[in-house]
Image (spheres, grey):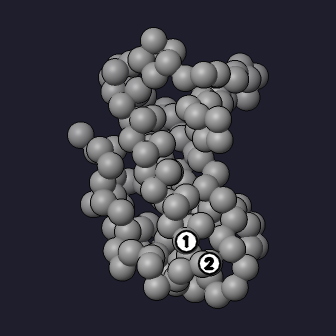
Amino acid sequence: MTCVLNPPAIYASEEDKTWGVALTEDLTVLVEYDEAKDCLVLAGELGTPPDGDRTALYELLLRMNYHWDTTGGIRMALDGPAGQVVQVYELATEGLEATRLGATVTAFAETAVAWREIIQRSGSAPDAMPEDPPANFGLRA
């Protein structure tokens, strides 16, 4: 994987079957193997929405989940009440090649960067939020 992505660091926990892939100084993608589904689950923390009315942001996140077919299958979640937004994507391992894995992690990271900006902007300029969720960043072939 390092030859495809060339991340600054990879943190592995063989016991938990998880890896943290540090793509930038402030963006690490957690990769966990789900044995029951035979897939890799990618997760990235996008930040906590600013205080105030989060309704418009939460609505946008729910619409993102509803349009999984046009957004590449990415899901958004909260890690608790008023918690961080977490981006999640499941990648089947059957037939998975290093090139596709690298491209998927890269696309996942691009989506995370876009959503971080949306989340940060939601507190200072809620009117500047997009009406529709960002489109597919190449997660579906």
**Tag shown at residue 136:** none
Residue 10 seen in the current view: yes
The secondary element bearing badge 1 is classed as helix
Residue at point 33%, 27% (across, down): 100
Separation (CA) of disc 1 from disc 2: 5 Å
**Tag shown at residue 121:** 1
Q: Residue furthest left?
A: 141
Type of amino acid at the residue the image marks with label 1 = Arg
Quadrant of the drawing holding the C terminus: top left
Residue at point 55%, 23% (across, down): 7
Q: Position of residue 63 (x, y in %)?
A: 41, 74
Q: Residue furthest top?
A: 3
Q: Position of residue 57 (x, y in %)?
A: 54, 77
Residue 34 seen in the current view: no
Q: Is residue 32 above or below residue 122?
A: above
Residue at point 73%, 67% (across, down): 83
Q: Count how many numbered circles sit on residues in the image.
A: 2
Q: Position of residue 49 (x, y in %)?
A: 66, 70
Q: Is residue 137 above or below residue 126?
A: above
Q: Is residue 60 left or right of residue 44?
A: left
Q: 28 or 18, which lies in front? A: 28
Q: Residues within 10 Å of mark 2 (few under 14, many from 20)?
A: some
Q: Is residue 38 left or right of residue 29?
A: left
Q: 125 or 31, which lies in front? A: 125
The secondary element bearing badge 2 is classed as helix
Q: 121 or 3, which lies in front? A: 121
Q: Is residue 125 above or below residue 138?
A: below
Q: Are marks 1 and 2 in contact (CB under 8 Å)?
A: yes
Residue under circle 2? 123
Q: Quadrant of residue 34?
A: top right
Q: Position of residue 81 (x, y in %)?
A: 75, 73
Type of amino acid at the residue the image marks with label 2 = Gly
